[in-house]
Image: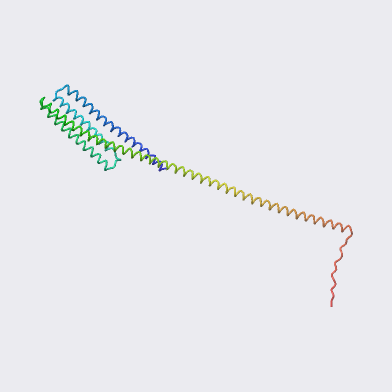
């Protein structure tokens, strides 16, 4: 019973862990979606501003846009770092590798963010013609950098997704194993209870049979004693009746002899010849 309670607690713990993993998965998907939305919004806003403003102003805002994208990626990585630190059930080597990947990517983002700030400072010194040339140059650089950054972020986020999915699968298997174990414990308990019930029933039947046997033995002895008493009484009655009959016959014979005048002859000793 105690082992069953432990398994019930383990099942509850695994269920909570599963809920936490699903929540982490949802939060990660939400971060990825927000990142995509920010990128799409920034691209649309950039096109409108480019048509309305001069190159140097647009470069300045484009630089700020890139910085905002980098800051957004930085926040995502920071959130991943916090999740990794909160998770205590990951294998140490894999956890260290995941942390190292996130820390490295965060460092890349911070370095690129610093580079964008330096670029922004350079823009203050540009003329309009130079701004157009710089815009085209920077746009190509930003495209390459964004592509590389997107690829790296995708690897980090995909790795995190895979890690969470593996944990969910491990948790599912653990819950299935826990359920099988609990079901087996319940079957064992039921079998033990049934065995105890049968043993008790057999014991009660044996007690009842023994009681009936003893009662039968007592009844048999009582019957034998009664039969012995009856036989003794019958024998005594037979002796008494025989004695009465004998006495009656003797009295009758004596009466008849008296009526006939019978006198008993004197007893004579036989003569003995002396030589």
Q: Position of residue 239 (x, y in %)?
A: 75, 55
User: Is 134 located above or below residue 243 in the figure?
Assistant: above
Foreground residue among 107 and 29: 29
Foreground residue among 128 and 232: 128
Number of callouts: 0
Q: Left or right: 68 with respect to 2?
A: left
Quarter residue 148 falls in: top left
Q: Left or right: 110 with respect to 22?
A: left
The quadrant of the image that shows the N terminus is top left
Quarter residue 10 falls in: top left
Q: Position of residue 13 (x, y in %)?
A: 35, 38
- Quick one: which residue is furthest to the right in this view? 261
Foreground residue among 275 and 199: 199
Quarter residue 270 falls in: bottom right
Q: How is the image coloured?
A: rainbow
- Quick one: which residue is furthest to the top in this view? 52
User: Is 247 located above or below residue 113 in the figure?
Assistant: below
Q: Position of residue 164 (x, y in %)?
A: 30, 37
- Quick one: which residue is furthest to the bottom in this view? 275
The quadrant of the image that shows the C terminus is bottom right
Q: Position of residue 149 (x, y in %)?
A: 21, 34
Q: Left or right: 54 with respect to 10?
A: left
Foreground residue among 44 and 71: 44
């Amino acid at each position: 019973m105690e082992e069953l309670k432990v398994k019930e607690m383990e099942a509850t713990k695994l269920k909570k862990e599963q809920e936490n993993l699903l929540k982490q998965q949802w939060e990660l998907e939400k971060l990825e979606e927000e990142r995509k939305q920010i990128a799409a919004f920034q691209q649309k806003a950039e096109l409108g501003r480019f048509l309305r403003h001069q190159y140097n102003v647009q470069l300045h805002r484009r630089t700020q846009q890139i910085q905002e994208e980098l800051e957004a990626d930085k926040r995502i990585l920071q959130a991943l770092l916090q999740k990794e630190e909160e998770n205590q059930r990951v294998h140490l080597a894999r956890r260290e590798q995941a942390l190292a990947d996130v820390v490295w990517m965060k460092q890349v983002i911070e370095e690129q963010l610093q580079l964008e700030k330096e670029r922004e400072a350079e823009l203050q010194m540009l003329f309009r013609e130079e701004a157009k040339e710089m815009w085209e140059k920077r746009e190509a650089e930003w495209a390459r950098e964004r592509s590389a950054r997107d690829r790296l972020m995708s690897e980090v986020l995909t790795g995190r997704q895979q890690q969470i999915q593996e944990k969910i699968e491990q948790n599912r298997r653990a819950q299935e194993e826990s359920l099988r174990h609990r079901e087996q414990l319940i079957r064992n308990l039921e079998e033990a209870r049934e065995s105890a019930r049968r043993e008790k029933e057999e014991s009660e039947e044996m007690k009842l049979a023994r009681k009936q046997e003893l009662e039968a033995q007592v009844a048999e002895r009582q019957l034998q004693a009664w039969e012995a008493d009856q036989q003794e009484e019958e024998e005594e009655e037979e002796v008494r009746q025989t004695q009465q009959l004998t006495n009656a016959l003797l009295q009758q014979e004596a009466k008849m002899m008296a009526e006939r005048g019978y006198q008993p002859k004197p007893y004579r000793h036989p003569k003995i010849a002396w030589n």
